[in-house]
Amino acid sequence: MASVGSIRRGGFSVVGRSHGLAAEFFGQRKISCAVDATLGGGRDALFLASLLSEGGKVYGFDIQAEAVRRSRGLFEKNGLLDRCEFFNAGHENMSDLIPRALFGNVGCVFFNLGWLPGSDKSVATRPSTTVAAIRAAVELMDKSRGFLSVAAYRAHPGGREEFEAVGELFEREIPFGECEISDPADAGSPALFYARFGRGR
């Protein structure tokens, strides 16, 4: 994998770290639009909702209907159904499904790669569609103040190839990209790629 300004940190949760970095980046500033590119159980989407301004919305994507159902249920439980629009579709299609008026105005995009916990592990994100989706996300983002996060997992079949593909994309195409490895001593430990756009880098 190409070297992406790696910051060696040990023993952290990539999900917790991504939330912390995004919260620190935005501070008290609210955003009008966020994207959860891999809904899973909806926890990332729920965090993204906490960053929204009044009337803001989280757009979410997942190829598994169960993931969309779980995420919608979590938002309903928290009284936030009016703050979300979730699609049972691959994240590489986000540019076709997010309203054109929001292009260039998406404040934060999260990817949590792999598979839906408790589901068929053969249904997982793939390097080609993940790379296409990250490129689409960068196009959608607010370049004056935006945050992109990609949690990648190296231990499962296909995970290392996806990790390397994301690393190469960050190295070649994404300004200010960083990569943190959860446990540098463990070749299968998760990694977090992220990029800050605009002010607050």
Image (cartoon, rainbow, N blue to C red):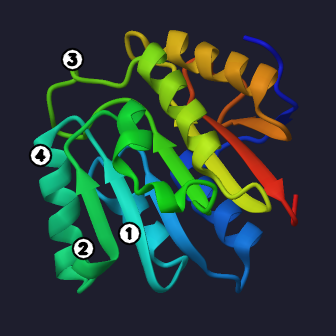
Q: Amino acid at mark 4?
A: Glu
Q: Amino acid at mark 1?
A: Leu
Residue furthest toward the front? 101
Q: Are marks 4 and 1 in contact (CB under 8 Å)?
A: no
Going 76% across and 26% down the picture, which residue do you hit? 173
Q: CA distance from mark 2 to mark 1?
A: 7 Å
Image spot of residue 144 (x, y percent): 80, 62
State the mark number for residue 122.
Answer: 3
Amino acid type at circle 3 is: Ser
Which numbered marker is on residue 46?
1
How many numbered dots are placed on residues in this image?
4
**Horizontal side, residue 149 vs residue 63: left or right:** right
Q: Residues within 10 Å of mark 2 (few under 14, many from 20)?
A: some
Q: CA distance from mark 3 to mark 4?
A: 15 Å
- Label 2 sits on what residue type? Phe
Residue at image point 12% right, 43% down: 65
Which of marks 2 and 3 precedes in the sequence? 2
Asked whether the viewer can see residue 153, the reply is no
Expressed as whole percent of the image width and height from the top left, the position of residue 5 reads 87, 31
Q: Earlier in the sequence, mark 2 or mark 1?
A: 1
* Left or right: where 41 falls relative to 28: left
Q: Using the image, determine if residue 96 lies above or below residue 115.
A: below
Residue at coordinates 23% horizontally, 77% vertically from top-left? 81
In the picture of the structure, the residue carrying the numbered disc 4 is 66
Circles 2 and 1 in contact, beta carbons < 8 Å: yes
Measured Cα–Cα span from mark 3 to mark 2:
27 Å
Q: Residue at x 61, y 62 (%)?
A: 105
Asked whether, in this view, residue 1 is left or right of residue 78, the answer is right
In space, the residues marked 2 and 4 are separated at their CA atoms by 14 Å
* Badge 4: residue crowd in 10 Å (few <14, some 14–19, many ≥20): some
